[in-house]
Image (cartoon, grey):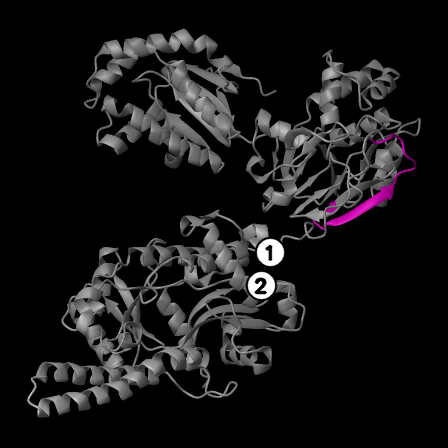
Amino acid sequence: MTDATTTEATTTDVTRTVGIPAMGLVLLVGVSGSGKSTFAREHFRPTEVISSDFCRGLVSDDENDQTATPDAFDVLGYIAATRLRRGLLTVVDATNVQPAGRAQLVALAKAHDVLVDAIVLDVPEPLAAERTAQRPDRHFGSHVVRRQYRDLHRSLGRMRREGFRRVHVLRGPEEIAAVQIVRERSWNDRSDLTGPFDVVGDVHGCVSELRMLLTQLGWQLELDDDGRAVGARHPEGRTAAFVGDLVDRGPDTPGVLRLVMGMVAAGTALCVSGNHEAKMLRALKGANVTPSHGLAESLAQLEAEPEEFRADLLTFLDGLISHYVLDGGRLVVAHAGLKEAYHGRSSARVRAFALYGDTTGESDEYGLPVRYPWAREYRGKATVVYGHTPVSFAEWVNNTICLDTGVVFGGALAALRYPEREVVSVPAEQQWYEPVRPLAAPTEQAEAREPSVLRIDDVAGTRWLESPHAGKVKIPEENAAAALEVMSRFAVDPRWLVYLPPTMSPAATSHAEGYLEHPEQAFEEYSSWGVTRVVCEEKHMGSRAVAVLARDAAVARDRFGVDDGTSGAVYTRTGRPFLGEESGLVERVREAVAPLFETLETDWLALDCELLPWSMKALDLIQDTYASVGAAARHGLPSGLELLQAASARGLDVVDLTARLERRLENAAAFRAAYARYVAPTSGLDGVRLAPFQILAAEGRVLAVTEPHPWHLEQLGRLEDPFLVPTRRFVVDLASPAERGAATQWWLDLTERGGEGMVVKPAHLVPDRVQPGLKVRGREYLRIIYGPDYLDSLDVLRERHLGRKRHLALREHGLGLDALTGFVEREPLWQVHQRVFGVLALESEPVDPRL
């Protein structure tokens, strides 16, 4: 059924339809002037077509530069490979008249396990030459068309042997114009079937147990005049799905086949091929196979059946496919399982994996192949149900389940009710076949887990994360180790940990007199990135906090899986909890923001905030570092001035040194005043306040992605609770010098009154690769960061490099949005945690902490 065939379209209404794979590669084949580009525009979306001319233009600025052809095809191959990896139909618009060029593209399709078709536009050579001559951008003569025409017709008869599924030859302009393209889903794509399903494990000729299991599942058997089961229907309209290995070893292989074939023919069941069906098919077709592992007994049982039954069986076995993708891609049924990269794909490699699993090439002590435990590494969204390797009982491993519970070996016959995820089984009547080795023990409990549990090998070691918002992000092993230490020892219950905030870059360094940072640089940078309006938001000097809040404990249990009675968490940038549960902080935050639950029609919220005052969390840092510097300066510098005064009285020239020491004493006083502004006494929640500035997410919505920043500040500004600190802001049209000047003055006034500074953010939605925010800190606040005398070293400090900090901010921001998106879309929590963990791991990168 998958062999390549050559079809020719005619102008009749019946035969001018050309079917192509909906997920695969299509090569347009034809000489220059045959109309390939026009054909592509008429039948395919622009994004689906990759033109060799376009790729030549990309690499040389000239679509006709033939010297750029090798580089152009490198680009074409990369784009095609990326699209095929993502499961997208890809059409290559090139001449493709030479076998060597086609072979490279066929190999590309094979590497990505997709089907490949060719559509040949075969027009008369004079017509192609005439069309080419009329194009002003074509400067080659008719001899080029003649050579292409010769190359095409030399290989046309052999094309179907080059690995194409089908070769569609359209002859002449009339046939080309009359063709209708139809996209054909692969046979394994039954995502339109939504169930519910009863997935049945390996039966191996045990018809009595199969009848008992179906009856227990509520199926009504259909019997013939001899009392044999020839079909079954479920009164609730359920569909059965068999994982293969219906045959061999058991007492009545024909009885199992008769029942399952009847159900499949009636449309009440699906069945994939097992390795035993594949071997039986080869035997029935006359291949020289070894009749071992029960095949000899099955063939003997089939000899007693009528010829008509055996003929129907041959047709049935020949039509079994490797796997099914069901329920919108949420369920995959394959005999030996299937890793995510193979779901819905079509190739010999995919079929081999589905039938036999992933073997290591070694044999165990029983002489059986050692199979790689692919399920332990599985992290896909689809539930994979399979059999093949007998286990003592069915168990979940990373959203996969093996239903071969060894009924023929005296175990049980199992089925999975989907989507209920309920396992139903019946015991074997007896041991029908002696196993070569004992049934495999269940996976260790540590291995058997639901996809909501984070495991060390999800995050340990060097890892690449595919981030829709940040691109491909590398997490080095050493960063992962540092993050693991923090996460495992200090983090909140990981079920609340759905987001960590990113680092933030300062604006470009200012060269204004007396300033290291200034608003004008932030305005200029955003303007150069295509941002037209920004929000200048007051930067609160506190501790960054994320608040994840459920409306009540019931929501916490149902949405977050937290059943200990808690209903939220407030945690730091590194996932550590603020205060303790007994403090009542979560309850106080929920009370303060309670109106948002109604306004946003949600049962849970995630907020980005600052918890004030800074000293609540950083008191040890203030006392041990900043206060000690200030105290040393206040005591040491006056003593130095006294000595200089005495030296001056003796006639020594110490005027410059005295002035420098006096300036340092003034700087020390300013340094102490700078950090003292952010120190305030707290006791429990007394003195603690919260400044929320962004609503990250709510049920069904990632508001950090869908809403511009002024919307967040407006929603939060409506909250009236003394526990909350409002965030002052100034909106600026970057095209207005007056507004930019007013915002700068606002920043100057804010910082002179003791404010830390401001954060400049886009006031409208922007592409992911634009900095989400730039901080502009005040002159006095920067004394805390760079030291009391930093203004005397501005020339040196202006050499600071922001590139790594900027790159880090974008990657962390993107991973944070991915984590929120994954949680909102109800992805397995371990996937959300991988991204959250990635943010924490990136924080270990060596970047100047003062930036």
Q: Nearer the viewer, residue 346 or 181?
A: 346
Is there any visible trace of residue 242 in the rendered image? yes
Magenta-colored stretch includes residue 419: yes
The correct choice, above or below, for 275 with respect to 820 in the image is above
Question: Is 672 left, or right, of 414 in this rendering?
Answer: left
**Residue at x 87% of width, y 30% of height:** 434
On the image, the x and y values in percent for residue 39 come to 37, 25
Is there any visible trace of residue 734 in the rendered image? no
Which image quarter holds the C terminus?
bottom left
Find residue 454 and name its label.
1
The quarter of the picture where residue 297 lies is top right
**Residue at x 60% of width, y 44% of height:** 377
**Residue at x 82% of width, y 25% of height:** 248
Question: Which comes before the other along the chain, label 1 or label 2?
Answer: 1
The correct choice, above or below, for 609 with respect to 143 in the image is below
Q: Which residue is mark 2?
A: 494
Residue type at mark 2? Pro
On the image, the x and y values in percent for residue 147 come to 30, 9
Report helix, strand or loop for mark 2. helix
Q: Residues within 10 Å of mark 2 (few under 14, many from 20)?
A: some
Report helix, strand or loop for mark 1. loop
Question: Is 283 left, or right, of 249 in this rendering?
Answer: left
Does the residue at mark 1 contact the one at mark 2 (Cβ under 8 Å)? yes
Q: Which residues are magenta?
A: 417-435
Q: Nearer the viewer, residue 47 or 87?
A: 87
Question: Is 150 left, or right, of 141 in this rendering?
Answer: right
Mark 1 → mark 2, Cα distance in angstroms = 8 Å
Magenta-colored stretch includes residue 81: no
Which image quarter holds the N terminus?
top right
On the image, the x and y values in percent for residue 712 come to 40, 69
